[in-house]
């Protein structure tokens, strides 16, 4: 997978942390759930149809935009 639907925006957004200790994840604008870890995030990507080896996409800004906090952090 080398392209992201022909746009410059990352299709996966990991939003800022919530008070519930987790980060909301949207894929192509659709809410997939609240991730509490990278394992949760990769599961959401799998459910969205991405390959099981989606781990390598987590640090690729063409695929994932991390908002409001450091990547891979899920608790305040």
Image (cartoon, rainbow, N blue to C red):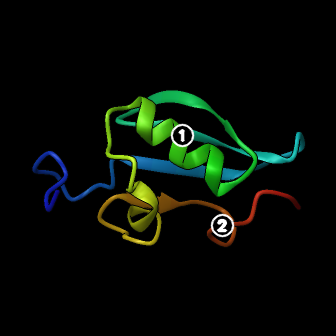
Query: In the image, residue 14 lies at what x, y percent?
Result: 56, 51
Query: In the image, residue 52 lies at what x, y percent?
Result: 39, 47
Within the image, what quadrant is residue 49 found in? Answer: top left
**Nearer the observer, disc 1 or disc 2?**
1
Q: Quadrant of the C terminus?
A: bottom right
Q: Is residue 31 left or right of residue 34?
A: left
Q: Is residue 45 left or right of residue 3?
A: right
Q: What whole-number distance in Å separates the C-alpha atoms at marks 1 and 2?
A: 14 Å
Q: Residue at x 67, y 72 (%)?
A: 70
How many residues crowd mark 1 within 10 Å: few (<14), some (14–19), many (20+)?
some
Within the image, what quadrant is residue 28 found in? Answer: top left
Who comes first in sequence, dot 1 or dot 2?
1
Q: Residue at x 16, y 52 (%)?
A: 7
How many residues crowd mark 2 within 10 Å: few (<14), some (14–19), many (20+)?
some
Query: In the image, residue 71 lies at what x, y percent?
Result: 62, 69
As displayed, is residue 67 above or below residue 19?
A: below
Q: Which secondary structure lies at badge 2?
A: loop
Task: Specify the label residue 43 is tagged with.
Answer: 1
**Is label 1 in contact with label 2 (beta carbons under 8 Å)?**
no
- Residue on which disc 2 sits: 72
Q: Which secondary structure lies at badge 1?
A: helix
Q: Which residue of the protein is positioned furthest toward the front in this rendering? A: 52
Q: Is residue 30 left or right of residue 66?
A: left
Residue toward you, 53 or 48 = 53
Residue toward you, 46 or 29 = 46
Residue toward you, 16 or 53 = 53
Query: In the image, residue 11 lies at what x, y percent?
Result: 33, 47
Within the image, what quadrant is residue 9 found in? Answer: bottom left
């Amino acid at each position: 997978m080398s392209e992201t639907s022909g746009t410059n925006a990352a299709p996966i957004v990991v939003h800022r942390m919530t008070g519930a200790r987790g980060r909301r994840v949207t894929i192509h604008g659709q809410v997939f759930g609240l991730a509490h870890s990278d394992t949760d995030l990769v599961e959401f990507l799998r459910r969205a149809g991405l390959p099981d080896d989606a781990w390598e996409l987590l640090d690729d800004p063409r695929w994932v935009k991390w908002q409001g906090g450091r990547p891979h952090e899920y608790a305040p």
